[in-house]
Image: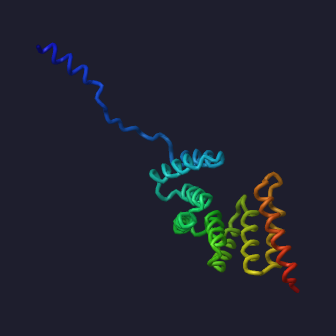
Amino acid sequence: MLWLLSLSLAACSGLPRIVVLHDPLTPEEHVTLGSGYEAQGLTKQAAEEYQAALRKQPDDVTALVGLGNLSYQEGKIKDAERYYRKVLDRDPDHPMANNNLASVYLSLGKNLAEAEQLARRALVKESPHKAYFWETLASIHLRQGRLAEAQGDLNLADSLAPVKDRELREKIAQTSAEITKALARNPQP
């Protein structure tokens, strides 16, 4: 009888077990993986990796910027604003967060004076993204009706924009066309 009981218990060894796995990746590795997913358009996977980085390091500004960018792309503007604000709470001079929060305000058509300050702050530190920052400032000046400044900013963006950056080149061309239309409607001295 004891033999039958031990056989029955052996058959039950297939019961579910809880296994706790250790995440071997560092926050930086999660961010790198998230950036790779983001570049491929895999936004869900990118967000998961950025969140994993934040679980390990809650103040990881690169992960927060990544989540802000994903939120912005998905039209979740308030979420994007919240993520960029978190970055700026930790690092007020973070170039990308300053520029991207300026873009949030520009897209909402509000806080344009603050957006201008943010865009200018983005330009202070050295960054490979300065052409983007100048284009943002040009767009803000365009929205404010400061067309000569907008054109000057856009000229700087154009001079710094990498030739192979098609997306930025298209944005510069679009902003240039908008400035030209605005100047035709309201010639400035």
> In the rendering, at what x and y percent does residue 98 appear?
63, 68
Quadrant containing the N terminus in the rendered view: top left
Q: Position of residue 78 (x, y in %)?
A: 54, 67
Left or right: 46, with 152 as reference point: left
Which quadrant of the structure image shows residue 13? top left
Residue 142 placement: quadrant:
bottom right
Q: For the point 84% across and 63% down, which residue is it?
A: 159
Residue 45 vertical position relative to residue 2 in the rendered view, above or below: below
Query: Which residue occupies the foreground of this view, 182 or 50?
Result: 182
Residue shown at the point (65%, 75%) measured from the top left = 109
Q: Please indicate whether residue 36 sits to the left or right of residue 177 in the image.
A: left
The picture places residue 132, in percent across and down from the top left corner, at 73, 63
**Nearer-the-camera pick, 90 or 2:** 2
Rendered view: 66 above or below 9: below
Where residue 55 appears, as percent x and y from the top left, is: 45, 52
- Location of residue 182 with respect to 72 vertically, above or below: below
| Image quadrant where residue 76 sits | bottom right
Residue visible at 86% across and 84% down in the picture: 188
Query: Image quadrant for the C terminus?
Result: bottom right
Residue depicted at x 66% and y 78%: 112
